[in-house]
Amino acid sequence: MIDGELELVALQQKYVEDVLAAVRHPQTVREAPETGRISRQSLIDFLAIAPSGRHPGNAATGRCPTYHFWMRLNDASALRIAGGIGLRIGDGETELRYTGHIGYNVYPPVRGRRLAERASRLLLPLARRHGLKSAWITCNPDNLASRKTAERLGAVLVETVPVPVGHELYQRGEREKCRFRIDL
């Protein structure tokens, strides 16, 4: 899936060094310290549970099947990997209310290029092929960049909901989610 210099690539071992370069970039470490703590081992572990970026899901833990991609830049950018994006194929409460079907993260040094929007547009046909009639994107209320991305995609803000105390997002400090719907 390609849009200009942006290409969505399946997660593979050959991109690990490029991901590490992006997460260790001084701007990433300064502006997104949690991302800056990603390690080689955590990437290798993730590749083991989601070969080629496909996580089969796990009903026992409430995880739905998910496609994961890295946003690869094929231009003169200092970074080769700009971030990641995932498409969750599920209709459980977690996907519909808290995590959304589409989740993205763009590393600070390459933000401002509408990469999350462009990558999301590349995933919409895959969502349709899986029979989704609408796709949900969620974000924290104070994440203005993510809100603008959803709006540029044509998503409509449906509501803002509290994250339940026992939810893993709550444990990470997230208290509310804005819910945006894109009709496919």
Image (spheres, helix red, strand yellow):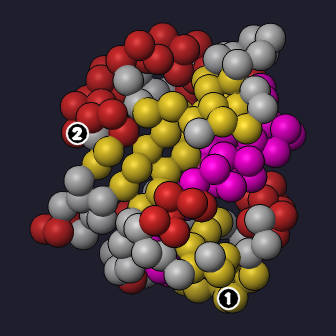
* Magenta residue check for 106: yes
Residue 124 position (above or below residue 118) = below
Residue occupying the far left of the picture: 60
Q: Which mark is residue 49?
A: 2
- The structure residue drawn at horizontal position 62% and vertical position 44%, both measured from the top left corner, is 105
The residue that disc 1 covers is 159
Circle 1 Cα neighbour tier, 10 Å, few/some/many (<14 / 14–19 / ≥20): few
Residue 157 position (above or below residue 66) = below
The percent coordinates of residue 21 (x first, y second) are 58, 13
The percent coordinates of residue 170 (x first, y second) are 45, 68
The CA span between labels 2 and 1 is: 33 Å
Q: Give the quarter of the figure containing the C terminus.
A: bottom right
Left or right, 45 with respect to 109, comes to left
Q: Residue 28 sits in which quadrant?
A: top right
Tell me where the magenta segment starts and ends, as one range.
Answer: 95-123
Q: For this rendering, which residue is in front, 82 or 89? A: 89
Q: Residue 158 sits in which quadrant?
A: bottom right
Q: For this rendering, which residue is in front, 124 or 15? A: 124
The percent coordinates of residue 121 (x first, y second) are 68, 55
* Magenta residue check for 76: no
SS at badge 2: helix
SS at badge 1: strand
Left or right, 57 with respect to 15, comes to left
The percent coordinates of residue 35 (x first, y second) are 55, 34
Q: Earlier in the sequence, mark 2 or mark 1?
A: 2
Kind of residue sitting beneath label 1: Glu
Marks 2 and 1: which is nearer the front?
2
